[in-house]
Image (cartoon, helix red, strand yellow):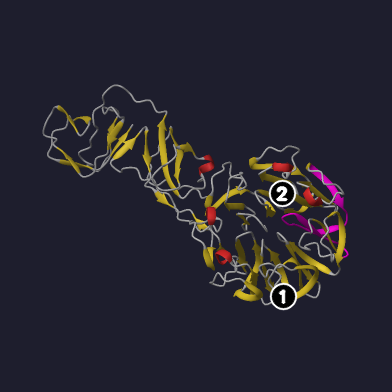
Amino acid sequence: MSISEHSLAIDENNTLWTWGHNSSGQLGDGTRKNKSTPVQVLEDVVQVSAGEAHTMAIKSNKTLWAWGNNLYGRLGDGTSASSNSPIQVLENVIQVSAGGYHTMAIKSDNTLWAWGYNNSGRLGDGTRTNSNTPVQVLEDVVQVSAGANHTMAIKSDNTLWAWGNNQYGQLGNGATTTSNTPIQVLGDVVQVSAGETHTMAIKSDNTLWAWGAQSSGQLGNGETGSNRQATPIQVLEDIIQASAGSNHSLAIKSDNTLWAWGNNLYGKLGDGATTSSNTPIQVLEDVAQVSATKRHTMAIKSDETLWAWGNNGNGRLGDGTTISSSTPINIIDQMIQLPDINIKAKPIYYHTSGYWESEIIDLGPGWIKTKDINIDTLLISEGQNVEMEVATSDDGYSFTSYTPIEKETIPQARYLKVKAILTSEVSIPSEEKKLIFDQQNPENEIILNKFVKADGHIKLITDYYFNMNRDDSSEEEGFIYRSKIKNNWKRINSIRVD
């Protein structure tokens, strides 16, 4: 995610959520509209990687899926047509890394494959020819990281290999000459992260090493300037994970403290300031994973809460706003459960057909999980069916048209209105039938078999008194009743359709 302007996260159910910039369909939600809160895109996802304007994801069955900008064939589907929804491009993939305009993937046999833009030889296939389909580059690879225009890979013997653009010494081989084939640069490496113009690597002894551009202090060695560091230098000890962004860096120590250094524009270091630092500063505790991007940073704590800081253009922080933050903000401390949606029928009506609408439901910013709808107090009898429809809105004012809800679940949206539509297959007799009333049991049901209101409604009667001294018919409250029983006022508690 070294130069991405959108964000990705996989939840505990292996559901992929995306948010931020979406001009090329890189969110994968079928649109090209930016999102400031996470939207659900794909299920059964085990690993994901964000490129400059495209996204790659691996499912549990090891199929590789791609979407977003496809300039230079970076999606790997054999075309250059962009896609705003996921398309399958490869099988048997165990790790993927999306770079600026190219993509790298490791198959289950540990072969490394590359595709997309090949300027500076970043694909590593010995040419500078673009490819819209995967080409094999290396064997025996266990980890890969695609930077903006260079690539890093670790083999099973822990040797580190590099290729692509080397203008700032980001390959780490002591030179600044570009290479279109892999060259070995370091040994005993267990993790690597390729940034835009610099690289970070962790050795087996948990020492952190850095090289490449240091114009903003992103190497963390106390130096800032135009000098290029073309060979690896040790920066920190006791490091378990590191991430190289565009021109800033993050690292997690074994005590789970998070450290940051480099360019601090928009507050992407997370220390509450916007002043750059060429040495590591502690910004957060209890961190389990971190990812540095072009202008913002994301981190997951050990309690699985998600935190973000830095530039919030296009909503890339995911907090429902576009306001940047120089301190970590908790994007989601737990998945927001959709509240029960109770669509209440008016208790004085028995509907054979018609509909009811809910009030506007504000779900608030955050990750919205779908949930079954509870239909409360709908008067449903044999031969009647209920269908559910939903209208959504981003602002609470302009709603989409109602559309059917599949499997009684709610689509992703900030605001919702739900409609219950009741239809009946029961035929209504045309003849009038008189009320049947038992004087000995005034609590008995009264049976009606005639609808007289044009909208097909019968009004329920509660605590209503009939004058039983009259031997005639009359209309009252939208229905016809007829009494042949002479008596005093009687209380009638219920009415039903027979």
The residue closer to the viewer here, 396 or 449, is 396
Name the residue type under label 2.
Tyr
Is residue 244 left or right of 364 when viewed as pictured? right
* Percent of width and height locating residue 262: 65, 69
Write down the quadrant of residue 440 in the picture. Answer: top left
* Percent of width and height locating residue 396: 40, 48
- According to the picture, the residue beneath numbered tag 2 turns out to be 101
- Mark nearer the N terminus (2 vs 1): 2
Residue 233 is labelled as none
Is residue 326 left or right of 342 when viewed as pictured? right
Circle 2 crowding by C-alpha within 10 Å: few under 14, some 14–19, many from 20: many
Magenta highlight range: 133-157
- According to the picture, the residue beneath numbered tag 1 turns out to be 221
The residue closer to the viewer here, 165 or 441, is 165
Which residue is at a point 50% across and 43% down the rendered structure image? 408
Quarter of the image that includes the C terminus: top left
The residue closer to the viewer here, 17 or 226, is 226
* Percent of width and height locating residue 53: 65, 49
Asked if the residue at tag 1 contacts the one at tag 2, i.e. Cβ–Cβ closer than 8 Å, the answer is no
Circle 1 crowding by C-alpha within 10 Å: few under 14, some 14–19, many from 20: some
